[in-house]
Image (spheres, helix red, strand yellow):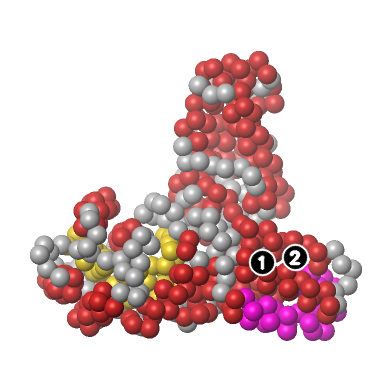
Amino acid sequence: MFSSLSDKLELVFKKLRGRGKLTESNIKDAMRDVRQALLEADVNYKVARDFVKAVEEKAIGTEVLQSIDPGQLIVKIVHDELVALLGGTVVPLAPIDKSPTVYLVCGLQGSGKTTLTAKIALWAKRKNKKPLLVAADIYRPAAIKQLKVLADSIGVAHFQLDGKKPPEICREAVKFAEKNFIDLVILDTAGRLHVDDELMHELEEIQALVKPDEVLLVADAMTGQDAVKVAEAFHTRLHLTGVALSKLDGDARGGAALSIRKVTGCPIKLASVGEKLADLEPFHPDRLASRILGMGDIVTLVEKAQENFDNQKAQKMQEKLLKAQFDFEDFLEQIQQLKKMGPLESVLQMIPGAGKAMKGMTFDEKEVDRMAAVIQSMTLKERRNPHIIDGSRKKRIAGGSGSTVQQINQLIKQFFAMQKMFSSMSKHKFAGLPRGFALK
């Protein structure tokens, strides 16, 4: 997500940097391009207008026009305004400080509510809390079974009540939680259109009965401006406490993420960044703004690495990088480590400069298995020195791994690209990265 917007903003900044001196005229020209880029990213037109106006007012001032590096200063202004647009600061979920704390999850059908409830349950479990998933969707076929399967997969409790209406199910679930020392009750309600008055009234009834500590709307980031309209309608009826953006790992243009806080005034609290149940993050406005502007997101990258990397293996990898001994076996190991951290392309976008270096390359999750087969078909000498792999060796490796010579060429190209990236990171000495990622 945001790749198209990021590319267009980069072009705008490149034009500004190419000018020896910034004037009011060329700043206004640049802001027109920024506004167009935002509109094409499906950002609400009022939001785009106000954003550009705010940037322009700060940019057309003596501080920018007289700056030694005005181009970079404008990037900072745009970054700061993006952070403000996205909410400014992290707004956490309601604390799980009473038994039971209740989260009501709602949204349109197909927005990813049921999966998100399981993600929240796993997040709570990892914080040593005892969650309960409640099947309050009695309308969608297999919804109850889906929630049970998800609950079983992460080892958390599941509650269902056959033959009852959702408000009663939710009320009884809270009573059950009180008796069984449950820390967090997560209500998975049915998907509904915001124009369906009967079903919206049902949500209001649930809210009145159980008095949830968190009323969380799941907004599908792939739906663009529709997500903003839905959020407005739900907020009017339920007084939402937060929004969770789902499918942020998709290829949508990102308009919902950039518009929803400004239009509704409701904070974005969570971001679902992958299909796995562990792929859930607190929503950090500053980090997302940095990703949009191609600055990477080192803090999130470090957090993910600390959760998933083996310290001993990382130490060995650092030693190899120091000695320029990064080979194909190391290449496979690094890809497998990155895969544990979430969708590979999303992880790479967090590394400053990696997005451009890896542009055009794709990392299908199934690719790791094919890479392993290819690498295992190489001789030890070839793994340690990929430069010697010529045409005849490629044919042999392709035959041994069930691949084509074209696929072998692609893998070698990816290897050298990653080798170059790690070499660059080593030279820049990115402070704060865990061992195995970059050198301090």
**For the magenta stretch, what is the residue range?**
48-75
**Residue type, label 1:** Ala
Q: Gap in Å between the C-alphas at discs 1 and 2?
A: 9 Å
**Residue 286 seen in render:** no
- Residue 34: x and y in percent read 70, 70
Residue wearing tag 2: 12
- SS type, badge 1: helix
Instruction: Quadrant for residue 9, please give it.
Output: bottom right
Disc marking residue 338: none
- Residue 152: x and y in percent read 23, 51
The residue located at (11%, 62%) in the rendering is 162
Q: For the N terminus, give its image quadrant.
A: bottom right
Q: Is residue 127 magenta?
A: no
Disc marking residue 37: 1
Badge 1 density bin: few <14, some 14–19, many ≥20, Cα 10 Å: many
Considering the whole magenta stretch, tell me its main secondary structure. Answer: helix
The residue located at (82%, 84%) in the rendering is 62
Instruction: Quadrant for residue 217, please give it.
Output: bottom left
- Residue 91: x and y in percent read 45, 76
N-terminal-most mark, 1 or 2: 2
Image side of residue 244 versus residue 391, left or right: left
- SS type, badge 2: helix
Image side of residue 56 versus residue 40, left or right: right
- Residue 238: x and y in percent read 33, 81
Q: Is residue 341 above or below residue 2?
A: above
Asked if the residue at tag 2 contacts the one at tag 1, i.e. Cβ–Cβ closer than 8 Å, the answer is yes
Q: Is residue 113 above or below residue 231?
A: above
Q: Is residue 52 magenta?
A: yes
Q: Nearer the viewer, residue 438 or 12?
A: 12
**Residue 46 seen in render:** yes
